[in-house]
């Protein structure tokens, strides 16, 4: 393990281009829009009732609970996202709204620390009786994450005190000590949240509680069976999915493959990585590595989407990655970013950052429209809208993004991730600065007590050049570690204009430039971005004979609006040459790929089958980044293109 | 319309090769096995209880009804199949068993003619209250078909009287007259059965009742809604599928596309064709043609399987024909044979016979193992067993044939079709003999009062030569019409050794040889059977870039046992040459196709995605007839092969 940790949000200022625009949309569109939704002020969206539930729980309003059993978490994730915005820019108006939400949450908390409006309002007698399904610990986890983030952003203790009291209450209920319940959450989340709470409070109780929850999971006899028997209802809804659904089929260190609900798995694995980092537990680290390997080498879409099965929103078997039926929940790709980012703090290996980047630029941000107002819950890689809207086995697929969801986990999850992207970009150690993600930005860091400014000038991911400029009052010795992405086959590096042999200084995907840095030192990194035809492992049966186009970190797709219907009819010659150009007026500005391809040229009339004619005609195809699809109306979309 | 009708079973003797063996298995294996199942004497199979239900209804046994609401139909279809065997060969032992079943059925019938053991035993107060779901008219239909067949085979009136009394009872309950219910069956079947009963009894009441059921379907207000309201339960099980499920969304003459449950649709369309034949109703014939066109040009698999959606066992939209998730129920392919055969008696067009043959040789007989003891309910065109057994969206797919089913419609349906195949082979008119299906056989027919023997010598479908020899006491004038299959691009014809220009005498796929025939006249038909690479219409998105191998009427597939795992990795060059040979020791004797193909040759290790390498290695692939797959254990199977 190495001694690296993420920078704090205020240490990096994203100064333009790709992510600056997305962060602007989070702040100016998504958070105000989501606040309106949480207040049920958006007429066309699914009702939320989430803030009203808190008002009712606090005795400030009358009425009944409405929404999913985990509706509270939408508020918590919104507050967490707001905290990340405030950490960089303390907008007083936004902070005032957030303070009011904090007050409301605090008012809803019960004297003993309990805080879950579903049970406070609807079932006060059923607290902690159905951990398998009822998401109390999940909601508590999100509240803790929000509390930690809001405290870190504003220095205000009120919500931190609320979540400490909540965590203390949970600690009094769960554990191995006599009289405590030996339960653990049906939906993981509190584990990683408790590690965060430990890190901000230094209170080891929270770390131990996190460890308890992780260690207890999957032990025999199954707690979920015990509590079901105590409730007298062994055969409820989720039971049909069995214990793999919540990764409770085996103790975590014995799990060989990523099973069950993909979001849950990611939150668990993230917590396992956190605990390995904090405790040095090698057996947990080994499990993390094994599960990482299984997810990313066998069960991940090229977009970084995970969860190939709508049934139980779960992983399927190795290599089973159907494109049109992919579940690939936005939250699962976000969870993969969480897991990857944590592994990266344990081991500086570009494999983790590659997957993190893959998910971020593709399967995560495909979850939101360019204007920030519409969302995908599932992110398929191939869509034939007529069939998707007709077939029962595609009922989880939406062919256009939606304003909100009854189960609204994804939109605020997206907001909190994008708003905190700075943390994912750079890690620092005592004498190390490791850059994982490239973006036009200014980092203000400290090495050996010296202030160092690391400026990146780039138009990544559209452009392959990144220029770093260092400013420091006095020369300082440290290692600058730059990720050489796995997608890049030709990278070059210059220091102050002088070519450096990259191979000799690159290990596990990071180039190390260890030297005494002077103010004005410049590093030029060039990551060649030709269009690549990517193949999937032949065991991924659905992608046999197909290629996906990738340029830099971006996976591309074909859309009907550019290429006409029946996209599967298009085939791309193996020797295709690609033309790329940046179109600032298209989809908020994207680099477009064009290529000469073929389409069938047979007269079919109304015939269904006939001997192969093999004649075809030339067409020019136009591909756009996958994340930007479905911003020009309903239509077919295709990532994996036939090769000929 | 033309004046053609099928021959009777005793007019054709199948004397060897393909169908003789299958008929032998029906008689010697399937019927005895199924009788044991119906008596619950097969330990490993799903329990049937079907005959016991009759015993209980007849007061001969005590107990409760068990099974599907349509369990009676399994007995009826078995009896019908037995009748077809007896029509050709009055095996006294088999007839004795059948007579006992007839006695049992007669004993179960109620004095008013009512006959449905589910209602007699379990719900005597609920007769005719839920036509939408309860299959009473469906069971009656199968009983009538059995009664007609058994009477025709044996001349014994007992079961014919039973079914006439049953039909009379139904006629007293349903119709447009005051006091009658204006209902129609949720599952069509009685309509075509009543036409058969009319044909054997000449009682027009039965024809009119059939016509009433067909005409009433889909009229507003919906009868199924009316009866649901009368029951006070509008929202039961099947309701979710809506009226298209049972083709009752529109009056039949207004239906433009084949919708809903595929078996139901086929039985309805067959009855419509029967009525068009009997009444000359042009509007019904037009509807039949339109629906035929939609099914066979837009919604049919290359195997003749239909019903692309497991949801409601139904048709999907045009061109949506997924291979691994195909429902393609065996009964639906059988139903398509029924429909095709009826259209063929209306219009001598090889298009009907082509589809009939396609279904028979592929999607129908794939439903039974070569030994006659195991059955497929669904017949997918691509199977990856690991995924099919894991994925919820494949839960309708079995990766090996089963001994029996809880819903056991398919096995006896197969038996009755194969046992009566003679009817489908040849039709006769006043001075016409039309041969639709080729098989080694002797037909004994009458034309203008003259006995004519038409002998076919062939090893069809393995061999492309068919030699007809005519025997007749005195020369007789008639037109011999021989089908030139749509799959055949090169046919030749000789009469008594002299070449005939086929094109000039062929219309709508039938070559007409009109002459005065002498005893000893010989016709040699050669239907060239090269291996064809067949493509699907590009709108069938899942088959883009793929070909299916077909030889003669047989669609071929690859199996893992011959070609190793990961069949999708195989690609077949466009210029592939094929080697074929008959292997008498393989799968009961089949012609095998071999070809040189390619497989990927990239080192993948444990990588999921990488830039395209495009290198491949040569392999020899071996294809077997689709119908014979899964007779050598569980494994992958693939019909549509990638082309390269």
Image (cartoon, coloured by chain):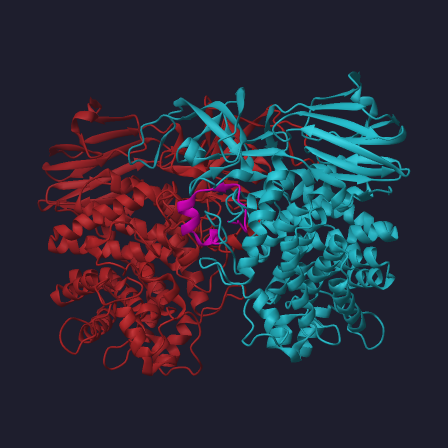
Chain colours: A cyan, B red
Q: Is residue B47 visible?
A: yes
Q: Nearer the viewer, residue A141 or B315?
A: A141
Magenta highlight on residue A375: yes
- Give the residue furthest to the top: A498
Q: Quadrant of the N terminus of chain B?
A: top left
- Residue A190 placement, left or right of A30: right
Q: Is residue B621 above or below residue B166?
A: above
* Residue A208 counted in the magenta span: no
Q: Which of the 4 image quadrants contains residue A137?
A: bottom right
- Would you identify the image quadrant in which residue B321 lies? top left
Left or right of residue B287, residue A519 in this image: right
Q: Is residue A509 visible?
A: no
x, y (%) of residue B116? 32, 74
Q: Is residue B116 above or below residue A298?
A: below
Is residue A281 left or right of B117 when viewed as pictured? right
Q: Position of residue B79 (x, y in %)?
A: 33, 64
Residue at image point 60% right, 43% down? A24
Number of marks present in the image shown? 0
Quarter where residue B548 is shown: top left
Q: Residues in magenta?
A: A374-395
Q: What residue lies at 22% left-to-right and 52% top-to-bottom? A: B8
Q: Nearer the viewer, residue A421 or A512?
A: A421
Q: Residue at x 83, y 70 (%)?
A: A176
């Amino acid at each position: 393990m190495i001694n690296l940790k993420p920078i704090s949000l205020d240490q990096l200022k994203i100064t333009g281009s790709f992510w600056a625009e997305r962060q602007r949309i989070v702040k100016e569109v998504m958070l105000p829009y989501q606040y309106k939704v949480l207040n049920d002020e958006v007429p066309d969206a699914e009702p939320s009732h989430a803030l009203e539930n808190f008002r009712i729980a606090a005795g400030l309003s009358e009425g009944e609970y409405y929404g999913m059993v985990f509706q509270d978490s939408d508020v918590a994730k919104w507050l967490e996202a707001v905290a990340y915005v405030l950490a960089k820019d303390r907008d007083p108006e936004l902070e005032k709204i957030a303070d009011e939400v904090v007050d409301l949450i605090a008012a809803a908390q019960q004297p003993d620390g309990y805080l879950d409006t579903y049970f406070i309002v609807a079932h006060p007698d059923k607290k902690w009786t159905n951990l398998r399904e009822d998401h109390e610990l999940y909601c508590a986890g999100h509240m803790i994450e929000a509390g930690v983030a809001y405290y870190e952003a504003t220095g205000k203790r009120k919500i931190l005190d609320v979540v400490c009291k909540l965590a203390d209450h949970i600690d009094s209920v769960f554990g191995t000590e006599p009289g405590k319940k030996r339960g653990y959450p049906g939906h993981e989340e509190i584990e990683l949240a408790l590690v965060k709470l430990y890190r901000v409070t230094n209170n080891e109780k929270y770390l131990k509680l996190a460890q308890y929850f992780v260690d207890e999971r999957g032990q025999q006899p199954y707690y979920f069976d015990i509590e079901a028997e105590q409730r007298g209802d062994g055969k409820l809804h989720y039971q049909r999915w069995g214990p793999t659904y919540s990764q409770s089929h085996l103790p975590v260190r014995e799990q060989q493959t990523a099973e069950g609900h993909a979001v849950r798995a990611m939150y668990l694995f993230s917590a396992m990585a956190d605990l390995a980092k904090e405790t040095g537990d090698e057996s947990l680290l080994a499990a993390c590595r094994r599960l990482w390997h299984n997810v990313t080498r066998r069960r991940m879409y090229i977009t970084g989407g995970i969860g190939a099965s709508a049934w139980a929103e779960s992983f399927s078997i190795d290599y089973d990655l159907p494109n049109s039926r992919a579940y690939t929940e936005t939250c699962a790709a976000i969870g993969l970013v969480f897991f990857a980012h944590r592994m990266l703090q344990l081991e500086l290996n570009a494999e983790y950052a590659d997957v993190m980047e893959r998910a971020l630029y593709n399967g995560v941000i495909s979850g939101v429209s360019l204007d920030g107002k519409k969302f995908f819950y599932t992110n398929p890689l191939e869509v034939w809208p007529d069939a998707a809207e007709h077939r029962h086995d595609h009922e989880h697929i939406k062919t256009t993004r939606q304003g909100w969801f009854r189960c609204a986990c994804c939109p605020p999850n997206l907001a909190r991730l994008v708003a905190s992207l700075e943390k994912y970009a750079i890690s620092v150690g005592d004498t190390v600065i490791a850059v994982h993600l490239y973006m036009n930005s200014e980092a203000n860091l400290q090495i050996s007590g010296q202030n160092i400014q690391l400026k990146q000038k780039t138009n990544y991911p559209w452009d392959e050049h990144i220029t770093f400029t260092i400013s420091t009052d006095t020369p300082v010795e440290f290692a600058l570690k730059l990720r050489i992405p796995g997608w890049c086959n030709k990278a070059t590096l210059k220091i102050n204009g002088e070519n450096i042999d990259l191979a000799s200084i690159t290990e596990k995907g990071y180039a190390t430039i260890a030297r005494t840095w002077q103010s004005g030192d410049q590093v030029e990194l060039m990551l060649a971005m030709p269009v690549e035809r990517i193949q999937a492992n032949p065991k991924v049966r659905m992608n046999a004979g197909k290629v996906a186009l990738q340029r830099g970190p971006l996976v591309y797709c074909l859309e009907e609006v550019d290429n006409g219907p029946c996209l599967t009819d298009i085939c791309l010659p193996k020797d295709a040459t690609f033309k790329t150009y940046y179109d600032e007026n298209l989809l908020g500005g994207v680099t477009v790929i064009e290529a000469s391809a073929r389409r069938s040229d047979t007269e079919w009339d109304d015939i269904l089958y006939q001997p192969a004619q093999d004649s075809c005609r030339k067409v020019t195809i136009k591909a756009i980044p996958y994340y930007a699809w479905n911003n020009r109306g309903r239509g077919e979309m295709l990532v994996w293109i036939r090769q000929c």
